[in-house]
Image (cartoon, grey):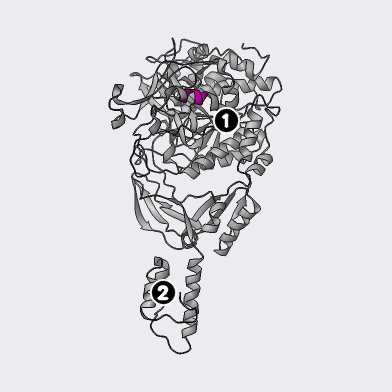
Amino acid sequence: MLDLGTPFRGGQTSDYITSLSPPIFFLFSQSHLSPTRPGHQSTITIMLWSVLLLAAGASAHVKSSLPSVPSGWKKVRAASADESVSLKIALPAHQPDALETAILRVSDPNHHEYGMHLSSEEVRSLVAPADETTDAVTSWLNRNGIKGKVDNDWVSFTTSVAKANNLLNTTFDWYQQDGDKTGPKLRTLQYSVPDELDAHVDMIQPTTRFGKLAAKASTIFEIFDEPEPKNIANVKVGGDHPTCTGCIYPDEIRSLYNIKYKPSASDKNTIAFASYLEQYSNYDDFTSFAKAFIPDAADRNYTVKLVKGGLHDQSPDKIGVEANLDLQYILAISNPIPIREYSIGGRGPLVPTANQPGPEISNEPYLDFFQYLLSLKNSELPATLSTSYGEEEQSVPREYALKVCSMIGQLGARGVSVIFSSGDSGPGDACIRNDGTNSTYFEPTFPGACPWVTSVGGTYQTGPEKAVDFSSGGFSMYHKRPVYQERVVKKYLDKIGDTYSDFFDEQGRGFPDVSAQASRYAVYVDGRLVGVSGTSASAPMFAGLVALLNAARKSHGLPSLGFINPLLYASKDAFTDIVNGAGTGCRGRPEFAGDVGGTAKWNATEGWDPVTGLGTPKFDKLLALAAPGVKNA
């Protein structure tokens, strides 16, 4: 141990200095530690020891890191010290279990507080950080010359690259994505926070947030295009509608699920859907679809809300198949309930995987969108929200997935039923872990495996319905199994024993929750009728059904359903159990080479299963449970 009063000499100095981190070594190397002039020795000694003590007390915890620059990106230049960067810090809740307890209390049909949804203020109090946390983070920023803006469990700030680098012990650079004409993005491959702040910070973004450019990354599985276009001008109200080969139409879906209830329009019961990745619904196609299949909606319209730089381009080359599918089948099932489209700009974080290695795939900015929704008053929120986008759960940073899932839960506690498609890859596509081991593992989806969403899988045929082979399902890597599905999922796991046990977490949240038709929906796109398959179809269809249930409740003075899963799992008689078909995937993995088709598969079986969930809906039964006394007519 060196004496603080003794100047460094000879090998003693060099041995100590070379053990330091590069930034500290650099400071020493510039100090000219050769023998000093009389009168200067003690000053230099004190300066050097100040640096050493500072280094010793400023150990940092790596909060997030990437092993390398994601595929499809390249570093194009270093960031200048005076360039600007804007970041958000997510703070942990003071009572981490309070939100979950509240959600289950107001969504359990057997609880005396069922339907007593929380206000925005009440939810904010549940997720609020401790004063100590807010003070610690803002003080940290202040010490580094940065002023943060606090909004409950978020702290946002804008600063220079030099200060951000110093704050997070990192290096921000400019990265360019192949084929992206919007310009480079300011990102880093790793960031840290001081050890004493680790427990006070959930995440900081955008840092290791590398988006992926894509034309679409929704859960559309296939598009079947007819050889001849159907001219919009030829569509007549109430006439024989155009057809597409092998397609299923709105009247067939309503008949299959026994949907006869006719609600009244009310601005207190809005259904909404989210559009990402420059997917824009089209007014002309909406009108054509309504004329052809929903004659009494021929004069209907819908509203569009632009969020975070979203657009609503009506140019023919900007028509989104996904957006049109969502809009048209929400209309088909829920008419005349008001419809709202949220068009969201931006792209979210991605951790590269074997399925999503390059610019063909993109994550969506769920974080920004749900922050926007949570900023609204309860009266401004839709009662039902449908989203048909998703990606591999492992491709999303764990802390990001957990935070977004919590935000979805907050919406459920405030009375919003959030519906997501389960995905279109069966147990998975590549089925390779992205942790560097390259081991075989099934691929749950995000946000479809979040316990606060209603996840919708897919079926096809009608006599009887079967699980469609692309319907995603499985068990979450990040979320433990929630209490509302414990009994049925445990029963399924007991049934399959050790089958595939090495490839999924049997303690994880099981998904999907329910399923519906997902094959060849007839959709108008740029004036022509096409067939569209995917859980992108089953999700908005089921969301439309939930909107009807909310309308029925409103007609009897009851609150909206909000988070609906506990009701669904308590109502097994309200579903047709799907016992045929399977979701298949993981083709090419050696562990499944000897299986039929060379793939892994989740079979549809009696009871809940990870391909069709509880089954497909019997609307009359669900209506009787959700709104007793309302007739299905």
- Tell me where residue 469 sits by quadrant: top left
Q: Which x, y percent locates residue 132?
A: 63, 55
Above or below for 224 versus 32: above
Q: Could you say where residue 557 lies in the image, as x and y percent from the top left?
A: 71, 22
Residue 28, disc: 2
Q: Which mark sits nearer the N-terminus, 2 or 1?
A: 2
**Residue 245 among magenta residues:** no
Is 554 in front, or is 338?
A: 554
Q: Is residue 239 above or below residue 161?
A: above
Res 535 visible: yes
Residue 111 figure quarter: top right
Q: Nearer the viewer, residue 571 or 267?
A: 571
**Is residue 263 in view from this perspective?**
no
Secondary structure at badge 1 equals helix
- Assign a secondary structure to mark 2: helix
- Residue under the image location 58 percent in, 62 percent down: 142
The foreground one among 251 and 11 is 11
Residue 78, picture quadrant? bottom left
Question: Is 276 on the left or on the right of 335, as rendered?
Answer: left
Q: Which residues are magenta?
A: 488-493
Indicate the amino acid at tag 2.
Phe
Q: CA distance from mark 2 to mark 1?
A: 57 Å
**89 vs 610, nearest the viewer:** 610
Numbered tag placed on residue 483 in the rendering: 1
In the image, which is nearer the foreground, mark 2 or mark 1?
1
| Callout 1 crowding tier (Cα within 10 Å): few <14, some 14–19, many ≥20 | few
Image side of residue 379 versus residue 482, left or right? right
- Prevailing secondary structure of the magenta residues: helix
Which amino acid does the dot numbered 1 rest on? Val
Where residue 533 sits: x, y (%)?
Answer: 41, 23
